[in-house]
Image (cartoon, rainbow, N blue to C red):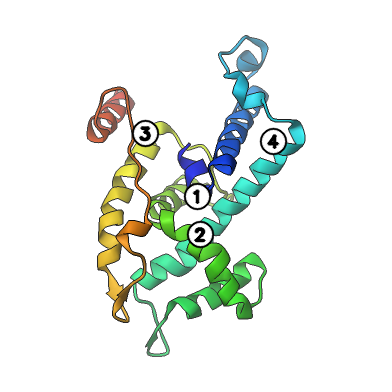
C-alpha cells in the first residue's frame, strides 16, 4: 500500500490496481522460491488474483516505471536542489537539474519542461517519502544488482513514514532563490494504523524482535 501510494498518490484506481499487482507478484515470487509454500494451502486474499493476467502484468510494469520516475526525480532533482549543488560557480535551479535528469529516462535535455510537468510535478506530493524510500533501496540493494523493490517489510515502512513526517515539515523551510521548492500543503501525509500501537512503539517492538 505504501509503494502504491508513492506511485499513484492522486489516482485511487491505479493505486488499488498496483496494490493488487504487487501482492500477486509477491505470492508468485515466494511460490517460485519456496516449495513448501507452493505445495501447501495458503491464506491468500482472492482479490489479489481478481485482475486478468494482461492487466496484472501491465499494472506491475507501469507501477515499476512510475517508481523509477519518482526515484530519478528524487536523486536528480530534489536532493541536489536541497543540497544546493553548485556547478561552475552557479547554484543549479530546477530547470537545469531537469535538463540533467531527462536523459536518464532516454529523453532529450531539451525535454526539461516535459520532465518537470510529467515527472517532477507528479513526484512533488510524495517527494518527502521518496527520500527515505530511495535511501532504503540503496542500502538494501546488492552492489551488482541495484533494482527497485516494491514490497518493503512493514518495519522498514514504519521507519520510512517516521522519517517522511520529519521531512514533510522540514523541506518547505529550505528556501533557495527566495522560494520553497515544495509547499507543505502540497505533500500528502500518511497516518498509519498499527494495531493500537504508535509508530514509535511499533518500530521499537520490531527492533526488539530482530534482536531476539
User: Residue, x 33% and y 41% (percent of image)?
Assistant: 159
User: Residue, x 72% and y 38% (percent of image)?
Assistant: 55
Give left or right: position of 193 versus 200.
right
From where the camera sits, is residue 69 visible?
yes
What separation in Å lies between label 1 and label 3 (alpha carbons)? Answer: 25 Å
From where the camera sits, is residue 146 visible?
no
Q: Nearer the viewer, residue 25 or 115?
A: 115
State the image coordinates of residue 69 (x, y, percent, origin top left): 56, 58
Numbered disc 3: secondary structure: helix
What is the quadrant of residue 160 in the picture?
top left
Q: Badge 1 is on which residue?
A: 10
Q: Nearer the viewer, mark 1 or mark 3?
A: 1
What separation in Å lies between label 2 and label 3 (alpha carbons)? Answer: 27 Å
Numbered disc 1: secondary structure: loop
Q: Earlier in the sequence, mark 2 or mark 4?
A: 4
Q: Badge 2 is on which residue?
A: 122
State the image coordinates of residue 177 (x, y, percent, origin top left): 32, 81
Q: Nearer the viewer, mark 1 or mark 4?
A: 1
Q: Are marks 2 and 1 in contact (CB under 8 Å)?
A: yes
Q: Earlier in the sequence, mark 3 or mark 4?
A: 4
Q: Residues within 10 Å of mark 2 (few under 14, many from 20)?
A: many
Amino acid at each position: 500500500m505504501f509503494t502504491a501510494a508513492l506511485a499513484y498518490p492522486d489516482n485511487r484506481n491505479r493505486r488499488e490496481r498496483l496494490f493488487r499487482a504487487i501482492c500477486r507478484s509477491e505470492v508468485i515470487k515466494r511460490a517460485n522460491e519456496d516449495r513448501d509454500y507452493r505445495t501447501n494451502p495458503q491464506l491468500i486474499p482472492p482479490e489479489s488474483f481478481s485482475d486478468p493476467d494482461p492487466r496484472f502484468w501491465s499494472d506491475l510494469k507501469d507501477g515499476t516505471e512510475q517508481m523509477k520516475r519518482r526515484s530519478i526525480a528524487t536523486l536528480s532533482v530534489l536532493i541536489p536542489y536541497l543540497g544546493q549543488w553548485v556547478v561552475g560557480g552557479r547554484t543549479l535551479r530546477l530547470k537545469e537539474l531537469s535538463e540533467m535528469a531527462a536523459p536518464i529516462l532516454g529523453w532529450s535535455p531539451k525535454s526539461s519542461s516535459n520532465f518537470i510537468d510529467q515527472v517532477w510535478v507528479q513526484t512533488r506530493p510524495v517527494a518527502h517519502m521518496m527520500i527515505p524510500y530511495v535511501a532504503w533501496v540503496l542500502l538494501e540493494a546488492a552492489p551488482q544488482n541495484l533494482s527497485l523493490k516494491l514490497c518493503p517489510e512493514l518495519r522498514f515502512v514504519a521507519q520510512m513514514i517516521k522519517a517522511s513526517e520529519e521531512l514533510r515539515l522540514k523541506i518547505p523551510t529550505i528556501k533557495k532563490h527566495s522560494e520553497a521548492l515544495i509547499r507543505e500543503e502540497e505533500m500528502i501525509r500518511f497516518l498509519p494504523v498499527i494495531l493500537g500501537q504508535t509508530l514509535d512503539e511499533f518500530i521499537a517492538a520490531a527492533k526488539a524482535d530482530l534482536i531476539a
